[in-house]
Image (cartoon, rainbow, N blue to C red):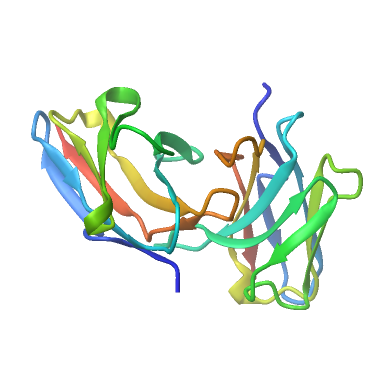
Amino acid sequence: DTGVSQDPRHKITKRGQNVTFRCDPISEHNRLYWYRQTLGQGPEFLTYFQNEAQLEKSRLLSDRFSAERPKGSFSTLEIQRTEQGDSAMYLCASSLLTGGHNEQFFGPGTRLTVL
Amino acid sequence: AQSVSQHNHHVILSEAASLELGCNYSYGGTVNLFWYVQYPGQHLQLLLKYFSGDPLVKGIKGFEAEFIKSKFSFNLRKPSVQWSDTAEYFCAVNNRDDKIIFGKGTRLHILP
């Protein structure tokens, strides 16, 4: 399978714990995006990378959230001191920016439940 | 602020009925427009996209959408729906190389 993969698919944690999610983009894609989707809402942008550089962060991304893409390939999203409001589906997408067109391909998501 | 508005949150149709889902966006400058679909238990999939050119775009599974620039609209249509079209549909927009802004989604239920 050469699509975007995410790990784990499901994560249940207790409030106050730290969690880390991984995203592996399509191999030649230079852009990687993180989104969050809560029940009844569309995905909301969190942050994105071009290669290893983090170019934009949403105001939704509080100080407890950090994302990295150390070698311009896979990315990790860490949430520290989780809160119940962090419960959501976390989606990763990747794209190859060419000629101003930016079609993003989404992974299956990681569903986080904070108890 | 950039936004996408989907007119219907929940639509119920019988098989073979025609479908139109409304979408309006507020976004300055040149835009790319998308419709994504999420089938039950599956991840987001691209249904169709508009980058430039013919404003009537055709996607997978018989879906099409029309970009009307003057109305800031990108409505999704299908002449005859099937039970397998039951899913959640998201209209989305971005500004060329920017992040995607999604609408809140429309849940479509097709009655057999």
On the picture, is A31 further left or further right than B89?
Answer: right
Q: Position of residue B103 (x, y in %)?
A: 38, 59
Q: Is residue B59 above or below residue B20?
A: above
Q: Position of residue A32 (x, y in %)?
A: 71, 46
On the picture, is A5 further left or further right than B2?
Answer: right
Q: Position of residue A48 (x, y in %)?
A: 70, 55
Q: Quadrant of residue A55?
A: bottom right
Total numbered circles: 0
- Residue at 60 percent of width and 57 percent of height: A35
Q: Position of residue B48 (x, y in %)?
A: 38, 34
- Residue at 55 percent of width and 39 percent of height: A101
Q: Quadrant of residue A26?
A: top right
Quarter of the image with the N terminus of chain B in it? bottom left
Q: Quadrant of residue B40?
A: top left
Given the current orientation, which residue lies at the most extreme right position?
A71
Quarter of the image with the C terminus of chain B in it? top left
- Residue at 83 percent of width and 39 percent of height: A73
- Residue at 29 percent of width and 51 percent of height: B107
